Amino acid sequence: MIGYVSGTVIYSDSQKSIVLTAQGVGYEVHTATPLVPNRDIALFISHIIREDAQNLFGFETADDKKFFEMLLSVNGIGPKSAFALVSHLGMAQIITAITLENVDVLKSAPGVGKKSAEQIILSLKDKVTKLEVGMVTKEKPMRTGIKVGDEKQIDAFLVKETLAACQGLGFKDQDVMPMIQKHMMNVSKPEELLKLILKELR
């Protein structure tokens, strides 16, 4: 099984990239966004083997790779849907949506419908609450990797109250969730978090 690939990007489009290793082997890898040709890259790989195909899905961090594989354990969620969730929403936003049972946020990922979103919440809510994962790291925002254990955990009340207030003002959950994750480390009250979000939206 292939678990890690490093090399030079020799081709990339919106779905796949080809990474040429020092050994002269070019691996075709599913990537979330196009990569810059002629740049060196290192990716954690989830190697999916099916009867009719083998696919490599590339991630910047080992945490994203593990979470992608956790999503695959959900009944009805295949590699394409799981990859869309991780690449479109990011691990932290998925964890928040599962914890708060927010179907709409999960549905915003391409190819994920209401039933699939509900199944993800049902299957992973207990597992997610046991993860020792912070919402964001100080060095990197939510989409680039999550440190384990040394950051503030999800404050469900804070997030729920802030989301409710934003909904009342006409904002969609998927639009404000990244800002909630960005600022929640620095506040303790929903009204404080709401002020920061509104300031950013203006």
Image (cartoon, rainbow, N blue to C red):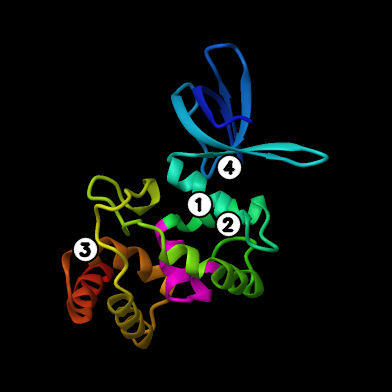
Characterize the magenta stretch by its predominant secondary structure: helix
CA gap between label 4 and label 1 equals 22 Å
Residue tagged 2: 71
CA gap between label 2 and label 3 equals 26 Å
Residue tagged 3: 185
Q: Residue at x 48, y 76 (%)?
A: 101
Pick the quarter of the image with the N terminus. top right
- Depth order, front residue of 31/66: 66
For badge 3, the amino acid type reads: Met
Is residue 3 shown left or right of residue 159? right
CA gap between label 4 and label 3 equals 33 Å
Callout 3: few (<14), some (14-19), or many (20+) C-alpha neighbours within 10 Å? some
Q: Relative to 131, is 122 above or below?
A: below
For badge 2, the amino acid type reads: Leu
Q: Residue at x 22, y 74 (%)?
A: 193
Circle 2 or circle 4, nearest the eye: 2
First along the sequence among labels 2 and 3: 2
| Residue 67 tag number | 1
